[in-house]
């Protein structure tokens, strides 16, 4: 279309056209009266697939996960009655630096001041968890606002933007002469600024003189698609690479230089000890949050070692640890320049080879062969994770969330090919993430989806089993059940020394029958001998699968949480670490 040729459109048509121009293929959402005008035009004029969910929370988490896997900003929409329900997913996306374009329809502007039904100040509600919050006041400004929304969401530190659309805008017409997109902002990162060159050289000098350096990479490495150059840097300088839980998979975890996950949510003793004993730590794409640093205690006395920090967000650099060199820039672009300098300035560089695989395998084998007796009627999450690790196809995506369903695969599951193959929500950590994240991932990937969830989380999202079944995807839900909010129970018993935790246990439910009612193929694993057969059968079935497994709560068998493990060792409690 010639940009100078005006075209008369209503607001619904203009929004759809701008989304198409930005390459949008899917939108996640749920209908409401305030969006009917949009849907009418959508059905008649657009091929963008609308993924109908049964809860706006599900839609918001699905959009976040879709964006993680696809590398493109995802579009989410919700009507005014459900506008508050999207806050969990938008908050996770904001803290995880994931771009989501979030449309919320609304009653006419200022009608909320008359107490119009469903009226609330949506702009104020979302301003704190989005990079920007826009209001469309007239149809003529739609092309400009959508270009800006995609530009803001995908540039710098990616994050959600919010677009508020009053109901009347969908019907109001205007002559539009600027229906075009800016191609750079169809994917993210949209631009790749390189950190200060002199600082990069200073970082190289520190890494070359360090006696025991280590790289710690967060999910910023995945967001930047920096896996290839990160591995190139690590191999050139022979520096081990540990990852935060959200950064899991940024390099293959079977590589000789891969430390695997570190920190308080899946870090094992050998990996946490390695980073503790390092003399130089190079942070890449991590905000050094409490979970990744065992509440900032992981590295011991921070003044006893050297820290280098590279991140796109200037506010993150040096925020929690004193850095000798701070690098503000895109991870991939900055590391590419760093590798280029090393190769040009040190053409004959030779470093002693490091192979961590023996100590990694010894640590894993110690866990796999520990034979800790499980409480009656339960199965070890270790056994489940190992079996899945043995049979998981390379193109599979695993989603998980806080609790038993994440802590074991975070530590024990191996991402064998670099990339976003393991999705968790350890930025905010709310329950009810894994199954919606699997839904979003299933629309951005062709491989099988395995969603680990706990029964505490599963109660948030049961209704969207119907969405999964309707989507006709290869999708397996693995429910690790213990009839309690086990993380809270474990925290209370192990750290607060509460004998009988209050408000953590809930009633038993026949989840297999529930899943059968939604049309899932189901199984209940009651012995270790069944695990591999049931898992293979589910992953090989191109449809919706549900597997229930009874597991011990975290106070009965203590998982990979350093503060808990310290207490378990003092009290002689069974634990993994």
Image (spheres, rainbow, N blue to C red):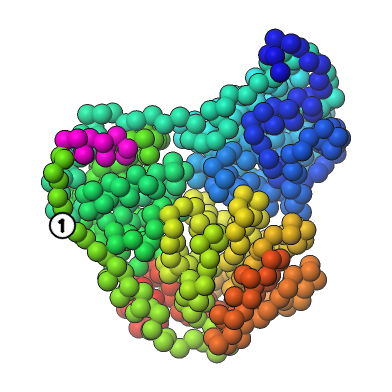
Image spot of residue 388 (x, y percent): 52, 72
Residue lying furthest top: 4
Q: Observer-nearest residue: 275 or 259?
A: 259
Q: In this rendering, is residue 373 above or below 28?
A: below
Quarter of the image that includes the N terminus: top right
At 76% from the left and 76% from the top, the residue drawn is: 513
The quarter of the rendered structure image containing the C terminus is bottom left
Q: Is residue 97 left or right of residue 120?
A: left
* Residue 338 part of the magenta-drawn span: yes
Residue at point 67%, 63% (across, down): 474
Q: Is residue 414 above or below residue 218?
A: below
**SS for callout 1:** loop
Decide which of 334, 548 is in the foreground and name it: 334
Residue appearing at x 74%, y 48% in the figure: 51
Q: Position of residue 543 (x, y in %)?
A: 71, 66
Report x, y in % for residue 110.
77, 25
Vertical comparison of 424 with 337: above or below:
below
Tally of marks: 1
34 horizontally vs 555: left or right? right
Quarter of the image holding residue 67? top right
Depth check: give the residue in front, 129 or 365. 365
Q: Name the residue under label 1.
A: 352
Label 1 neighbour load within 10 Å: few <14, some 14-19, many 20+: few
On screen, residue 314 above or below 428: above
Q: Residue at x 52, y 51 (%)?
A: 428
Q: Is the magenta stretch mostly helix, strand or loop?
A: helix
Visible residue check, residue 267 = yes
Magenta segment range?
335-345
> Could you tell me residue 509's position as x and y percent?
71, 76
Q: Is 358 in front, or is 154?
A: 358
């Amino acid at each position: 279309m010639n940009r100078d040729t005006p075209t008369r459109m209503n607001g619904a048509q203009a929004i759809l056209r701008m989304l198409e121009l930005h390459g949008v293929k899917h939108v996640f959402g749920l209908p409401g009266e305030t969006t009917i005008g949009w849907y009418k035009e959508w059905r008649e004029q657009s091929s963008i697939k609308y993924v109908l969910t049964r809860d706006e929370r599900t839609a918001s988490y699905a959009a976040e996960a879709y964006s993680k896997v696809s590398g493109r900003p995802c579009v989410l929409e919700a009507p005014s009655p459900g506008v508050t329900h999207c806050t969990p997913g938008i908050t996770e996306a904001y803290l995880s630096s994931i771009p989501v374009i979030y449309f919320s329809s609304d009653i006419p502007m200022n009608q909320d001041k008359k107490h119009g039904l469903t009226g609330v100040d949506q702009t104020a509600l979302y301003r704190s968890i989005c990079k920007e919050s826009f209001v469309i006041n007239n149809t003529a400004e739609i092309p400009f606002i959508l270009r800006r929304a995609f530009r803001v969401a995908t540039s710098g530190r990616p994050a959600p933007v919010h677009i508020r659309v009053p109901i009347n805008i969908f019907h109001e017409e205007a002559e539009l002469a600027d229906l075009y997109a800016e191609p750079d902002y169809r994917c993210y990162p949209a631009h790749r600024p390189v950190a200060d060159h002199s600082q990069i050289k200073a970082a190289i000098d520190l890494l070359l003189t360090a006696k025991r350096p280590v790289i710690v990479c967060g999910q910023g490495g995945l967001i930047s698609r920096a896996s290839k150059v990160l591995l190139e840097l690590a191999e050139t300088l022979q520096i081990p690479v540990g990852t935060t839980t959200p950064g899991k998979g940024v390099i293959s975890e079977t590589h000789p230089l891969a430390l695997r996950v570190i920190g308080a949510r899946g870090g094992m003793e050998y990996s946490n000890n390695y980073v503790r004993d390092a003399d130089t730590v190079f942070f890449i794409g991590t905000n050094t949050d409490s979970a990744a640093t065992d509440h900032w205690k992981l590295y011991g006395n921070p003044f006893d070692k050297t820290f280098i920090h590279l991140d796109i967000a200037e506010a993150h650099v040096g925020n929690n640890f004193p850095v000798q060199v701070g690098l503000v820039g895109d991870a991939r672009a900055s590391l590419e320049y760093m590798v280029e300098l090393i190769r040009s300035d040190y053409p004959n560089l030779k470093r002693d080879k490091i192979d961590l695989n023996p100590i990694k395998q010894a640590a894993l084998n110690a866990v796999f062969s520990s034979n800790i007796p499980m409480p009656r009627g339960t199965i070890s999450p270790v056994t489940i994770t190992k079996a899945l690790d043995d049979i998981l196809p390379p193109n599979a995506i695993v989603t998980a969330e806080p609790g038993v369903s994440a802590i074991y695969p975070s530590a024990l599951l191996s991402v064998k090919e670099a990339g976003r193959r393991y999705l968790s929500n350890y930025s905010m950590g709310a329950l009810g993430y894994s199954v919606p994240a699997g839904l979003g991932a299933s629309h951005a990937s062709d491989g099988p989806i395995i969603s680990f969830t706990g029964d505490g989380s599963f109660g948030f999202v049961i209704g969207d089993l119907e969405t999964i079944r309707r989507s006709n995807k290869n999708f397996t839900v693995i429910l690790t059940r213990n009839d309690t909010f086990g993380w809270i129970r474990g925290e209370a018993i192990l750290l607060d020394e509460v004998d009988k935790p209050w408000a953590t246990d809930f009633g038993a439910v026949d989840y297999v029958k529930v899943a059968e009612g939604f049309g899932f193929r189901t199984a209940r694993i009651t012995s270790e001998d069944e695990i591999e057969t049931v898992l293979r059968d589910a992953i090989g079935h191109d449809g919706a699968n549900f597997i229930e497994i009874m597991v011990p709560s975290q106070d009965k068998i203590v998982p990979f949480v350093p503060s808990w493990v310290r207490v378990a060792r003092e009290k002689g409690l069974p634990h993994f670490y």
